[in-house]
Image: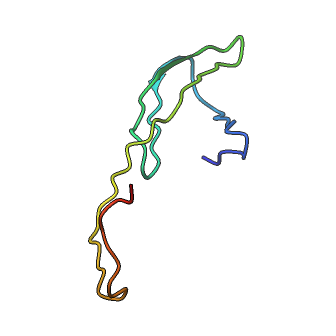
């Protein structure tokens, strides 16, 4: 499925019923909202992805001799 820049998307050809829409993106918590599809009107499902990114790494000060890693006051 393609998502437009404004976040809107459309699925076609689904039979009436309740579906679980699984939404994932790197760095965000996945969402799994239920969507009820009818043959009478378009279904709408609004959700927000919440960031869950983790920053990790190593600080190497060897390339900046004499530079302190202490916070300035």
Q: Position of residue 46 (x, y in %)?
A: 59, 23
Side of 35 where 42 appears, left or right: right
Point 71% across, 45% down: residue: 4
Is residue 6 rendered to the left or right of residue 2? right
Left or right? Give the position of 33 relative to 6. left
Q: Is residue 60 left or right of residue 37?
A: left
Report the label total.
Answer: 0
Q: In which quarter of the view is residue 39 placed? A: top right
Q: Position of residue 23 (x, y in %)?
A: 47, 38
Q: Report x, y in % for residue 36.
A: 54, 15
Q: How is the image coloured?
A: rainbow
Position of 59 relative to 49 (above/below): below
Residue located at (64% from left, 32% from top)? 13
In the displayed image of the protein, which residue is found farthest to the front?
A: 73
* Depth order, front residue of 26/70: 70
> Whole-percent x and y of residue 58?
26, 71
Of residue 36 and residue 61, the one placed in the foreground of this image is 61
Residue at position x 59%, y 22% from top? 45
When the figure is inspected, residue 56 is found, relative to residue 39, above or below; the finding is below
Q: Quadrant of residue 69?
A: bottom left
Taking the view exactly as shown, the residue that stands out farthest to the top is: 40
Quadrant where the image shows the C terminus: bottom left
Residue visible at 38% across and 60% down in the picture: 72
């Amino acid at each position: 499925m393609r998502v437009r820049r404004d976040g809107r998307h459309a699925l076609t050809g689904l039979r009436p019923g309740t579906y679980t829409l699984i939404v994932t993106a790197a760095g965000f918590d996945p969402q799994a909202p239920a969507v009820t599809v009818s043959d009478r009107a378009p279904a709408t499902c609004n959700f927000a992805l919440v960031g869950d990114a983790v920053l990790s790494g190593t600080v190497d000060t060897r390339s900046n001799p004499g530079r302190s890693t202490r916070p300035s006051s």
